[in-house]
Image (tube, rainbow, N blue to C red):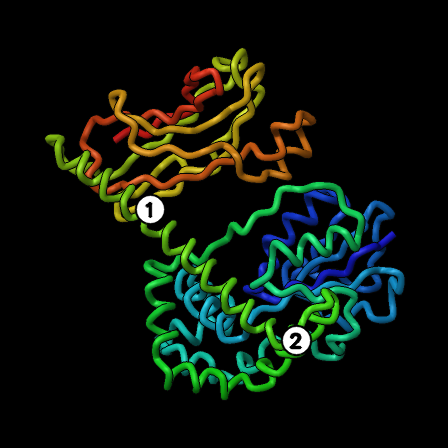
Amino acid sequence: MIEVLSVHIPKTAGTAFRHILLDVYGMGSVLEDYPPDRIHQLNQPISDKIQVIHGHFAPNKYKEYFSQAKKIVWLRHPIFRLISEYFFAKTIQDRANAIHFQLLEQNLGIVEFAAIPAMRNFLSRKIEGMKLAEFDFVGIQEFYPSDLAELQKLLGWKDFQATTKNSNRYPEYYKCLQEVLSDRTMMNSLAQLNQQDMELYTEALEIRAKRRNESVQIQSTLADWQRSQYLLQQMQAELARDRLELRQIRYWLKQFYQKAQTLEFKLVDKIQVAHLLTGFYVDSPQAKIATDTNLIVVSGWAIGKNVPASQVIITNNGQILCQTEVNLPRPDVAQVYPMIEAKNSGFETYLVVNGIPAQAKLKIQVVLKNKTKVAIGTISS
């Protein structure tokens, strides 16, 4: 039975919310309706196991179906949502998306991008055919943790691991964001191009105030405060990454090196470490790594056999280049491995590629809680 209809508006915490739904209901119980590649036709049968439909569908698509289902949508301040999509589009360079293709081909500025008819009042377009008051729950990204807690109580969900992963990866994104926010003329233009969305967002804040029995007047102030705290955290994270990059560059500068043309990643045979790890995998990088990219993402998952996995480190000749906790949500892994550690068995870190000396052999190691180190892969030049 369908219990939840979740409308995912791009760049409004929909991806993070998708992970929550998968965590709560399980992968086999969530139907993802994402046109054009994963579109669900209304005449197609739905398995009895499906409890949630989530995706980029118009809310009125299922208006005459599943009357008992809770209808959920997440919104975000329209200008911040627009800025996020603008820099996201410049990063992923998806030319299959007509609007993003226009942005890339014409090298549009953010106001020009906002003026594209399909981008104006984007939020209002995405819920067209259904009033905001008709949704059973309207979440606001600026209040994501507290609104998520309310929704958990409303639907009687078990505990889950919340994540806000999926940050914008545009280089110096938060610096660019600050530049846009400080340009009053630009901000005024963006607001005028999205007047209907600005009114919709105000309505969403009013709905939230009523739901929480709070003053309507303080909602926008609280939203501004939450945004400022989030931006501060993200800037601090960006600064930490910059420091990590600088530390690695300093390390390589101390070496006598010849720049390698390519790097090679190799995964350790799982049988060799089966006595220490129940399972592991490195999603990124791939076998061949081009050195024309300054940073590569090293990500995957690991589950200790008798002792939990605590960290993942990358070393060269015993020198730690970077390290990260093993604590990211991996609902896909939890579906395969029943142990509790599988739920948050993911990891992700960044490694500077340029400057790795010739003949270097970096080790990717899982550190167990008892300090035992288990090599799971190598990166060689």
Can residue 167 be seen? yes
Q: Label 1: how many residues lie within 10 Å, few (<14), some (14-19) or many (20+)?
A: some
Q: Name, please, the residue furthest toward the top.
A: 275
Q: Is residue 377 left or right of residue 200?
A: left
162 horizontally vs 263: left or right: right
Q: Does the rendering let one see residue 285?
A: no
Residue 341: image x %, image y %? Answer: 61, 28
In the image, what residue occupies the spot 40% across and 77% down? Answer: 110
The residue pinned by badge 2 equals 216
Left or right of 61 on screen, residue 190? left
Vertical arrangement, residue 197 with respect to residue 305, above or below: below
What amino acid is at disc 2? Val
* Picture quadrant where residue 78 is located: bottom right
In the visual, does 24 lie left or right of 145?
right
**Residue 134: x percent and y percent?**
79, 73
Tell me the kind of residue under disc 1: Arg
Q: Position of residue 359 (x, y in %)?
A: 21, 26
Judging depth in this view, the residue of 227 and 287 nearest the camera is 227
For mark 1, what is the residue? 241
Q: Secondary structure at mark 1?
A: helix
Q: Is residue 3 above or below residue 379?
A: below
Q: Residue at x 24, y 21 (%)?
A: 317
Give me the C-alpha separation between circle 2 and circle 1.
Answer: 38 Å
